[in-house]
Amino acid sequence: MWTPLIPAASWPDKLSTFGRETPLGQAGQTAELAAAYVFLASPEAFYISGAVVPITGGSSF
């Protein structure tokens, strides 16, 4: 996940390739997780219990 803290890390030489090893070829954005959080907090998710919502960027590990 790309967050505002990533550029502040001590490895600037790796910033240009950060996330490229994922199947989608880019780092995930925190906004891309928002829909899952909103859904799970919504009334529509009232019948979901013990489910896992995989947000893996295309990985199937």
Image: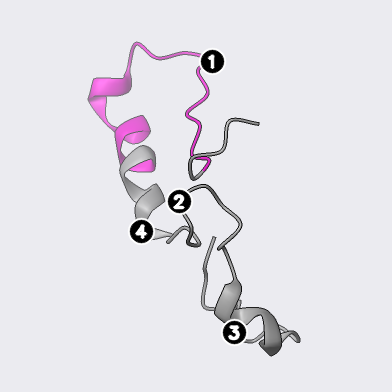
Picture quadrant of residue 35: top left
Which residue is pictured at 24% across the width and 25% down the height? 43
Q: Is residue 11 above or below residue 61?
A: below
Tags 2 and 1 touching, CB below 8 Å:
no
> Crowding at label 1, few (<14), some or many (≥20) Cα neighbours within 10 Å?
few
State the residue at coordinates (56%, 38%).
59
Give the number of the disc on residue 50.
Answer: 1
**Label 3: which secondary element:** loop
Disc nearest the viewer among 2 and 3: 2
- Residue 35 is labelled as none
Residue 23 drawn above or below residue 40: below
Looking at the image, which is closer to me, 61 or 38?
61
CA gap between label 4 and label 1 equals: 24 Å
| Amino acid beneath label 3 | Pro
Q: Amino acid at mark 1?
A: Gly
Q: Which residue is mark 2?
A: 24
Question: Quarter of the image holding residue 45?
Answer: top left
Magenta run includes residue 30: no
Disc 2 is placed on an element classified as loop
Between discs 2 and 4, the one toward the N terminus? 2
Instruction: Calculate the distance from the C-alpha at mark 2 to the C-alpha at mark 4.
Output: 16 Å
| Crowding at mark 2 (Cα within 10 Å: few <14, some 14-19, many 20+) | few
Q: Earlier in the sequence, mark 4 or mark 1?
A: 4
Residue 55 placement (x, y as % from top left): 48, 39
For discs 4 and 1, the disc positioned in front in the rendered view: 4
